[in-house]
Image (tube, rainbow, N blue to C red):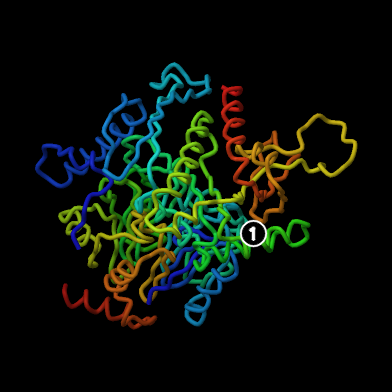
Amino acid sequence: MATRLQFENSCEVGVFSKLTNAYCLVSIGGSESFYSTFEAELADVIPVVKTSIGGTRIIGRLCAGNKNGLLLPHTTTDQELQHLRNSLPDQVVVQRVEERLSALGNCIACNDHVALTHPELDRETEEMIADVLGVEVFRQTIAGNILVGSYCTFSNKGGLVHPHTSVEDLDELSTLLQVPLVAGTVNRGSEVIAAGMTVNDWTAFCGSDTTATEVSVIESVFKLREAQPSAIVDEMRKSLIDSYV
Amino acid sequence: MPRKPTRHRRLMNYRPLTFSPFARQAARVASVCTINRQTNIAEPNKSPPKSAGDKLVKNSLKDKNEQSESSDEEEFDGNVQVDFAFFDPKADDFHGVKTLLQTYLDDREWDLSGFVDLILEQTTVGSVVKVEDDEDNGVFALVTALNLGRYMDHKCIIEVKEFLLKVSQEKDVIDDLRSLLGKEAQSVGLLVSQRVTNLPPQLLPPLYDGLFKEVSWATEDEPTEELKNSFHFKVYIIVSKVYKHKNADQKGKQNSDETIIYVKPEDEIFHKLSSWSFEFSLHTPQIVAHELRNYQQMGLVMAVKADKISTFQQQLQSLVEEES
């Protein structure tokens, strides 16, 4: 189910939060209703952690993560790093990355199996992504934009990309990512998909300006209507791939 | 759902001659870089307005960038020539206008999207300032006047009224304010004027002249009597922000610092001509420049009688002429 909400009059939910299948990060400083909306949806299933990164509130655009790990920019302070290590489940590896392109959330889009990155990311960062997040890494652009982490967002079930992505690019990306993709918008026509919404395998949060049509596209491509949080889904996927091979 | 390329018209026209999707993508990335650079450099005055509904008041200005520290290697010599144009508000301007109005009611969560929709629907009165043929469709300034009585059932207007009453709690003008927002709402206009901070002041007189002309045209041109009357404003309410000196209330301060610094020059004129005004403290976290370290940003609410407007327009014109 997709939930609409706002962070202090801003509909850019994906800027102030980061949602994965194993945890959820929420920025401090917003009103309590922002945090409590996440809590209400997720509290029983995954930890919801309030944090800042480098003293800023734009945590969703600075970090990249999935159920296996979390990558933080070099601007993260030691206290924040420690706080995250303490609050997140033990199986999530929290790692600070020395990378010139420090807005990792804008440069990396990932789910639990594949990551798309900015074409100019360092080699070492690419290796760290593959290690810490346990994914296969592809350098890509989306509709000519190098900030792949901003212009697309995908989970293990589906993905939403920049509205001007051509049909051939859509097919190419879909093959790479092994999930169905749709080109669309969020927050009443905003092209910056990942800033306007955040999603995992069973739920999504988008800005309150998002129209009903956009919400229905999100719910259908991410398969949220029949989704439920469960480790069984992962098990099923592994066995499917085995049988295909 | 067919996807229409709405904004990036120029980009779509450029079709690099390549065969593979990868090469096309690479060529497109290269072309984006060159096209972005070209829009920064001036284009000469083009004549026809974009669509039939636009009224185009041309104001071409050379916006001189004062930074003389640019190195010799840079292509720009520090001067950026920009053609600003005034347009009627359109539904497309939603995101630009919303960004300008983000902090209109301080940090309160309210129906901002509804408020923006209201402004954009009122095409007869109100203008947005944009750059000619700008790909990004950026909104640089907005000015409009909304009749509080006409829109009194809209959630956003109700929230604006509640906000104003709340911040005026201890002030003596609260009774005046309450009657303006209540009984007299039919003749009260909320003057909304927001813009990017460094917009050239030469644009202000035509911007406000345009607004007040539209208000008087609306009293004649609107289709129904009720609508015509709704633009017979007697009082304008303005919500704005100023910097007030932290020690302003102390008597006998030695320094020659000004008590109030106005972010928008016309606010100073409105403040002098206002029937009443009050300041209220803001909750949003502020990033204060070094020069303004003794100042605190405060909200300012003013009520200006409509008959003072022509004085305002004259004083604004002379203020701008002084400064330029």
Amino acid at circle 1: Leu
Q: Is residue B158 visible?
A: yes
- Horizontal arrangement in the rendering, residue A174 relative to residue B103 (left or right): left
Residue B289 coordinates in the image, percent (x, y):
66, 38
Where does label 1 land, which residue? B180
Q: Is residue A99 visible?
A: no
- Specify the farthest residue to the left: B19
Give the camera-side residue of B294 and B252.
Answer: B252
Give the percent coordinates (x, y) of residue B288: 66, 42
Please indicate whether residue B104 sits to the left or right of residue B61 in the image.
right
- Quadrant including the C terminus of chain B: top right
Depth check: give the residue in front, A119 or B82.
Answer: B82
The residue depicted at 72 percent of the width and 49 percent of the height is B276
The residue shown at (51%, 66%) is A25
Q: Residue at x 15, y 54 (%)?
A: A168
Q: Which picture quadrant has residue B257?
A: top right
Residue B119: give x, y in percent of width and height.
45, 54
Helix, strand or loop under label 1: helix
